[in-house]
Image: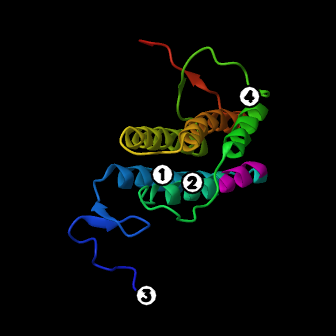
Amino acid sequence: MKIYTKTGDKGKTSLFGGTRVNKSHLRIDAYGNVDELNANVGLLRDQVKNEKISGVLYKVQDRLFVIGAILACDPDKKGMKLPEFNEEDVHFLELEIDRMEANLQPLKNFIIPGGHPVVSSAHIARTVCRRAERSMVLLSENSQVDVVLLEYVNRLSDYLFVLGRQLAKDLNVNEITWHAGA
């Protein structure tokens, strides 16, 4: 089987279920942004030296593949077997956020992203996550999107922000707070 099929050369692609849509379709944009997020989480995971954090990021990547698969399905095709996704996935991220926040100083200002490549990678993944979330919300305004998927991506951006802070602490990188006009 070849990687190229030439079936998308005229700007159309297929959803799971066989429905052909324009590559500019909101559903394609949503799962494309989730795919980009997954790649950025992979880049972050490659830079992290902590095995526990790396394991969490691997689990996040698995969940992002599931979200992408769900978003890639034609919602009008009934009876398709989809991977399971539920509130436990959201709760997992909340527990990880709470665990990290217990060891971090409370925030009083915005943080300027940076200080170390791995910290910057966490913030880049966070911003890509927010874009994926926006595209999923836009899709949800026009089509059915399970609310738990939106909750997960929203919580994931929070996780990535807190992870950036945790990584900065672990690496003894000073967080630079933003002060308007400074």
8 is within the stretch colored magenta: no
The answer to which image quadrant residue 75 occupies is: bottom left
Name the kind of residue labelled 1 in the image.
Val
Name the kind of residue labelled 4 in the image.
Glu
Image quarter hosting the C terminus = top left
Q: Is residue 22 left or right of residue 82?
A: left
User: Which of pointers 4 and 1 lies earlier in the amino acid sequence?
Assistant: 1
Q: Are marks 3 and 1 in contact (CB under 8 Å)?
A: no
- Residue 174 at what x, y percent from top left? 64, 28
- In this rendered view, identify the residue nearer to me: 70 or 128: 70
Residue in view at x 74 percent, y 28 percent: 101
Q: Secondary structure at mark 3?
A: loop
Name the kind of residue labelled 2 in the image.
Leu
Q: Residue furthest bottom?
A: 1
- Residue 67 at what x, y percent from top left? 54, 53
Q: Secondary structure at mark 4?
A: helix
Q: Main secondary structure of the magenta part?
A: helix
User: Which of pointers 2 and 3 lies earlier in the amino acid sequence?
Assistant: 3
- Residue 34 at what x, y percent from top left? 48, 51
Magenta stretch: give its range.
52-59
Residue 146, which numbered label?
Answer: none
Query: Which residue does the numbered mark 1 point to in the structure image?
Result: 34
- In this rendered view, identify the residue nearer to me: 115 or 149: 149
Q: Are marks 2 and 1 in contact (CB under 8 Å)?
A: yes
Residue 1, which numbered label?
Answer: 3
Q: Does the image show residue 159?
A: yes
Q: Are marks 4 and 1 in contact (CB under 8 Å)?
A: no
Q: CA distance from mark 4 to mark 3?
A: 48 Å
